[in-house]
């Protein structure tokens, strides 16, 4: 296998997911920072990698892959991570958890969306924080309720980390960053504690990969 390269940004939720999965698979990779704040994702160089101008982009096995959930599925399939069960009904239920984060909460809190919300409100103080809190807390409350279908032991859906955990933890990081109250979500907090003690999650945390300077 040739060199694995991950084009990411340290605070990107989608990139955070892929870092966790690569760590779970024990895949060494070279990170290449694409600074979203400096609009490097809109550069011709990065658009050639991904016409959507998004991160992450993963180069692996002679492929160039985009979209974090597609990358997670590829790693799960090719590296046998067991992120989702094989039974169709349980697989669909656990995938719904991942989508509740990655498809419903994350896109509306994307940097470009929030930046536009600020622009059309005249960049008033507190707009960004209010926007994040407005969408993150209800989404996580729903996720907490959905988790009631499983017994956390200690992960979202049982005894091993899965797709739902990989999607949840970056969103909890964002919740804490934007001072979203999750103190009344004991299932989420239990999963967060379990992940904090797992080396693959700890090594993927934004504070662990933040570029120097």
Image (cartoon, rainbow, N blue to C red):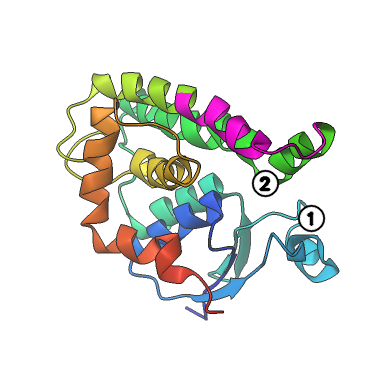
Q: Is residue 136 left or right of residue 154?
A: right
Q: Main secondary structure of the magenta part?
A: helix
**Distance (Cα) linking label 2 and label 1:** 17 Å
x and y, in percent, of residue 119 in the image: 82, 39
173 shown above or below 27: above
Give the residues drawn in magenta, as a range: 121-137
Choose between 108 and 61: the one closer to the eye.
Answer: 108
**What residue is drawn where x is 59% and y is 63%?**
9
Choose between 89 and 176: the one closer to the eye.
Answer: 176
- Disc 1 crowd, CA 10 A, few/some/many (<14, 14-19, 20+): few
Q: Of tags 2 and 1, which is closer to the observer?
A: 2
**What residue is drawn where x is 67% and y is 34%?**
127
Q: Is residue 84 left or right of residue 104?
A: left
120 shown above or below 35: above
Q: Secondary structure at mark 1?
A: loop
x and y, in percent, of residue 16 in the image: 47, 56
* Residue 177, magenta (yes or no): no
Q: Is residue 123 left or right of residue 128?
A: right
x and y, in percent, of residue 150 in the image: 22, 25
* Residue 132, magenta (yes or no): yes
Quadrant of residue 140 within the rendered picture: top left
Q: Is residue 102 left or right of residue 91?
A: right
Q: Earlier in the sequence, mark 2 or mark 1?
A: 1
Choose between 49 and 80: the one closer to the eye.
Answer: 49
Disc assigned to residue 95: none
Residue underneath mark 1: 51
Choose between 49 and 210: the one closer to the eye.
Answer: 210
Disc assigned to residue 111: 2
Q: Secondary structure at mark 2?
A: helix
Quarter of the figure that contains the C terminus: bottom right
Quadrant of residue 130 within the rendered picture: top right
């Amino acid at each position: 296998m040739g060199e694995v390269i991950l084009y990411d940004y340290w605070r990107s939720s989608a990139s955070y997911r892929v870092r966790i999965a690569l760590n779970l698979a024990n895949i060494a990779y070279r990170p290449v920072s694409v600074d979203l704040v400096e609009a490097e994702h809109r550069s011709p160089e990065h658009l050639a990698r991904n016409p959507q101008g998004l991160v992450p982009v993963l180069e692996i096995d002679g492929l160039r892959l985009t979209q974090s959930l597609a990358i997670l599925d590829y790693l799960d399939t090719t590296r046998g991570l067991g992120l989702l069960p094989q039974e169709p009904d349980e697989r669909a239920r656990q995938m719904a958890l991942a989508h509740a984060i990655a498809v419903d909460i994350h896109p509306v809190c994307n940097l470009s969306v929030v930046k536009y919300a600020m622009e059309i409100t005249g960049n008033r103080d507190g707009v960004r924080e209010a926007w994040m809190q407005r969408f993150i807390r209800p989404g996580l409350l729903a996720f907490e309720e959905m988790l009631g279908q499983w017994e956390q032991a200690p992960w979202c859906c049982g005894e091993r980390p899965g797709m739902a955990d990989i999607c949840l933890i970056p969103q909890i990081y964002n919740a804490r960053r934007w001072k979203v109250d999750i103190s009344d979500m004991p299932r989420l907090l239990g999963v967060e504690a379990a992940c904090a003690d797992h080396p693959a999650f700890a090594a993927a945390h934004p504070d662990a990969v933040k570029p120097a300077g």
